[in-house]
Image (cartoon, rainbow, N blue to C red):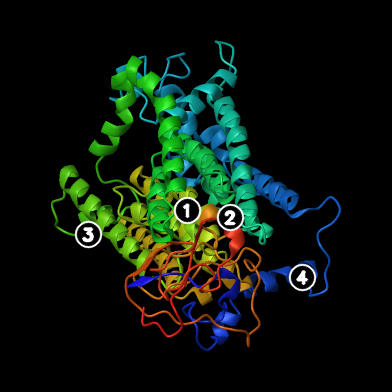
Amino acid sequence: MVHSDPPSSARPLPRAGAPDGTPGAADPAGREAGRDPVAEAGSEVIGGPRGRHAGDFVGWWTPLRVVALTSIGMFALGMVQKLPCWTTGWFHGAATQYTRACYSDIPHLYRARGFADGLIPYLDRIPEELGAGMEFLEYPVLTGAFMEAAAWLTPGGAQTYRPEQYYWSVNAGMLMICAVVIALCVSRIHPRRPLDGLMVALSPALALTATINWDLFAGALLLIGLLLWSRSRPFAAGVLIGLATAAKLYPLLVLGPLLLLCLRAGRLRPLFAVCGGAALSWTLVNLPVMLVAREGWATFYTFSRERSVDFGSLWLLLVQRTDLALDTERVNLLATGATLAGWAVLAVVTFVAPRRPRLPQLVFLAVAIFILFNKVYSPQYVLWLIPLAVLARPRWRDLLIWQSAEVLYFLAIWMYLAQTTGEPGLPRGGYHLAIALHLAATAYLCLVVLRDILRPGRDPVRADGSDDPAGGTLNGAADRFALRPHIPALPSERRGTPLADEGESLPPVPAGIVFHVKHSRGSTDRPGGGGVGTGGGDPGRGGVRETGPPEGSPT
C-alpha cells in the first residue's frame, strides 16, 4: 500500500485514552495512565499529591537537586551495608561476606589482578599465584582504565594497612558519581517527568549492588548518550555509546532499537551518525591496546565465550534441575539462538505496533532479553536495567514488584554461597526458587512494557500527549514503513499537548504495509493529481512537501 501523510497542521494528537493509540472510544483505564496511585499514596507523608493549582518548583529544592541528593543518600546507605565486610569480612574467610551479604569483587581483584603490585592491565601477565589461572585482566579496556585510575588514587606502600579498604572506598566514591549521573540523566531525558529520577535514586537494588562491580561506569556513559540522542545530537550520542561499549558490552545493544525505529520512521541519517560516532570512539579506545597487547585485550572476549554456566541464569536451573548435558559450547549456541529469536520478535513488534514504540521501551526489552538468556545473571546486572526500566515504564507498582524479586535474589545468592562454605544458609532448592522468581519478575516487567507498546494508551509517558521524549529526531516523526495502521507525524506545536476526552480523532488508515512517499511541488502524478496548489500545498516549505491521498482514496 502506498500512502502519504495528510498535512500535519490538520492532524490532532491521538488520545492517550485510546486503548491501542488509534481512533476509537476512550479506554477508562487509559485515561488513568498518567496517574500513579503508589506515588500518590506515598506522598501523603509529605502533604499529599501535587494539586492542580500548585506552582512550579521554586527556590533551592529543584527536582534535579532532590534527585541528586536522594541518590547520594541511598548510595551512602548501600556503603554502610558493606561495612561488616569493609572491617573484617573481606579479610577473614569467605563466610562472613556471604552471611552478611556484603560481598564485592572490587577489594578481591585489587590484589588478584595485580593492581596492588603495580602491574599494567593488558600488558603485564598476572602471576599464577595471584590470578589463579587468569593471565590478563578480563574486563573491557575502558573499565580497565577505570580500575587502574582508582589504583593510582589508592594509598600504597609497605606501611599501608589493608589497602583493599582504600581501593574499595576510592571506587565507591567514583561509582557514586556515576549513580548520580544516571539518576539525573533519567530526570532530564523526560523533561515533563523530572521526578522519575527518584525511581532510580531510591532503588533498593541499586543501593545493594552498586559497589559489587564496576557496571555503573558503563551505565553512566550510556545514559549520557541516550540524553544526547534525546536532544537530537546523534553523533555525540554515538560517541558516548561507543565509550560505554568500550566499558561493557551491553550498551552496543542500543543500536538495534535505533535501527528499527529509524527504519520505521524512514530517517537513516541520524542512524548513520550515531553508528559512526560509536565506531569512532570505540576504535580510538580499543585500537591502541589491541595493537600493543593483543592477547591481553582479547581476554575479555575469550573469557566471555569460554565461561561456563554460572549463577542466576536460566541455564543453571536447567543444568541443576534436569539431566540435560549442556556443555559450554552447546549453551553458547542455545543462548545465542534464544536471544536472536527474542530480538526477532521485538523487531516484528516494532513494525506491527499501532504507534512507533518509544526508544527506552525497545532498549529495555533488548537488554532484558539478552540478560534473561545469558549464561550468567549476576546480581549487579540489575544495574543495567534499572534506568532503562524507569524510562520504559515509570510506574512505582511495577518497579517495586520487580525490585522486590531482585532484592530477594540478592540475599538468596549470598545465603546459598554461605551454605556451600559450611555455614548455615540457603539450600540449593531455595536458591533455585529465588532464581525462578527473579527471572519471572524480569519477564513480568518485559510483558508490561510490551503491553504498553501494543496498547499505547496504557503508556504513562504518553498519557500527557507526548510521543517519545527520548526519541530525539524521531519524536513526533511520521512513519515511513509499518505493518499496521500508523500514526502520522505530529506537528511540533501539538507535541506534548493532550486532547480532551471528546476531542477529534485521527482519520483511520487501512491496515497493511504502509510506505510513505514525498512528492515535489508542482508534480502532476501525485495522488489526487493537479499541479501547484492542489491538495493544500504550503509555499513556505521549499521544493519538496508531503502530500496525502485524495479524500476517499482506498490507499
The residue type indicated by label 3 comes to Arg
Closer mark to the observer between disc 4 and disc 3: 4
Residue 382 higher or lower than 399, as above or below: above
Mark 4 or mark 1, earlier in chain: 4
Residue 97's disc number: none
Q: Secondary structure at mark 2?
A: loop
Real-space Cα separation, disc 2 to disc 3, in angstroms: 32 Å
Please name which of the two marks, 2 or 1, marks the residue nearer to the observer.
1
Residue 385 is marked as 1
Q: CA distance from mark 4 to mark 2?
A: 22 Å
Q: Which mark is residue 50?
A: 4
Outermost residue toward the right in this view: 59
Q: Are marks 3 and 1 in contact (CB under 8 Å)?
A: no
- The residue type indicated by label 1 comes to Leu
Which numbered disc, 2 or 1, marks the residue that appears first in the sequence? 2
- Looking at the image, residue 151 sits to the left or right of residue 275; the answer is right
Q: Is residue 494 above or below residue 370?
A: below
Q: Residues within 10 Å of mark 4 (few under 14, many from 20)?
A: few
Q: Nearer the viewer, residue 1 or 365?
A: 1
User: Label 3: which residue?
Assistant: 321
Name the side, left or right, on which 21 lies relative to 310: right
Which circle's residue, 3 or 1, is located before the other in the chain?
A: 3
Of labels 4 and 3, earlier in sequence is 4
Q: Which residue is mark 2?
A: 203
Work out how far the residue at label 4 is from the one at label 1, CA to CA, in angstroms: 29 Å
Can residue 125 be seen from the camera position used here?
no
**Residue that appears at 36% across and 82% down:** 554
